Image (spheres, helix red, strand yellow):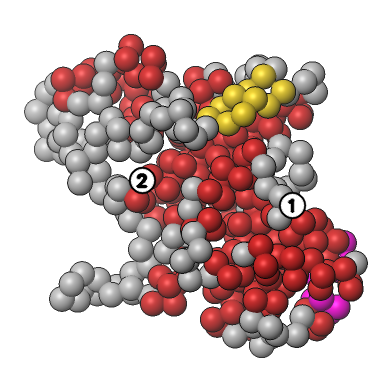
Amino acid sequence: MRATAATPLPPRKRAHPLESRSSPVCVDHQHLGDDPELRKRLALAVAALALNFLHKEMVKHKLWNALFEKGGVGTHGPPVRSLATRHLSSPAVDGWNAVAGAVELASAWAFNGTKLPRVLCGSHDLPYSVRIRLAVCMSVAWKFERQLASHFPRRFYDDKPSLSAPHTCELAYYGYAFMSDEERSRFGGWGEENANNVHALYDQMLALELSLLLSVPVFSTLVGSNQVQAERCIQALLDNAVLNVEDAMVTRSIVPFFNAVCQDGYTESPTAGELVCAAIICVRVAADDDCEEEMCTYFTAFERKRAREFVLGALSLKDIPELIVSMGCYADASWVNYRCISPHTLKRALVVFSWHV
């Protein structure tokens, strides 16, 4: 597929806040007040929405390959791991933990030394210096998880002959995606005719990527995200025969849903145990299985209390969490695991939590 200026961006419409300002995202006003820490938390929630949107569009347009290959080559392409593909193929599930990792990197680095605005409508109200850093965070997280699983067209040549040309300038493309319409107009568009500006943007972002790698413990930050740690919790439950393989994968598939519920700028970041507690109870309730052992044995009272709050919040989504959820499978009743996060299941899970909190 040919990457164009419009590839990762939604059409301009006034009907939906995601589309009203040509995104990556646009949300209702968030008043950040005078507390710098609160400003950062609210800005990080907007950043999470932007990163989710970019990831979804890149996978949707097949510029990023998020498949779960087994290896080897079949008649119709490499075979895939069927269980992972069934449950984790939707971009919203973030099967490779790239978005979760990018959010962690953004929290550690993207806002450093930047004065955030008092009022925030969307990502374009963040300073451009922050937005371009978000693009770098997404790039590093994606490469960490998927290495060479990108399929950008090679369009850009060097001034002098080079055996490695043409180049994709993929890193610059992420930065271009986070520009506003006005900034893109000044930049000059994405194409060979604007190669000088594209190369300059690439060099700028490459320097920022180096700065990130030198100033943040990237490996521990990415593997320490609550979503990755949630996978470790699920693996432990699988090893102890609390979950079978199918239920373990279903549980993992809805962990990002509850992570999204908490991206309101006010809720404290959930721990892995809290996320898994909310997810596994919803899986059990949806299957009409007994939840008693999980509730009493495998999760603390505080984890159960927080998980209940997540379920309650999921029943009344608004602002940024609502927009994140609306972008993907969690708002699609035809999705294979939708029953686990449907309003009916969430209400029943709330009753179960009331017995144990």
Front residue of 24/130: it is: 24
What residue span does the magenta drawing correspond to?
295-302
Q: Quadrant of the C terminus?
A: bottom right
Q: Compare marks 1 and 2 and give the one earlier in the sequence.
A: 2
Residue plotted at (70% across, 17% down)? 118
What's the distance in space between the residues labelled 1 and 2, CA to CA? 29 Å
Is 179 located above or below residue 77 in the figure?
above
Q: Is residue 206 visible?
A: no
Residue plotted at (77% across, 20% down)? 33
The secondary structure that most of the magenta stretch takes on is: helix
Q: Is residue 80 visible?
A: yes
Q: Position of residue 90 (x, y in %)?
A: 44, 60
Q: Position of residue 224 (x, y in %)?
A: 64, 54
Q: Which amino acid, by three-letter code, is at mark 1?
A: Gly
Q: Secondary structure at mark 1?
A: helix
Residue at which label 1 appears: 313
50 left or right, relative to 340: left
Residue at which label 2 appears: 58
Q: Given contact means CB atoms under 8 Å apart, are the residues at marks 1 and 2 in contact?
A: no
89 left or right, relative to 257: left
Is 208 located above or below residue 323 in the figure?
above
Q: Position of residue 115 (x, y in %)?
A: 66, 17
Q: Secondary structure at mark 2?
A: helix
How many C-alpha atoms fall within 10 Å of the one at disc 1: few (<14), some, or many (≥20)?
some
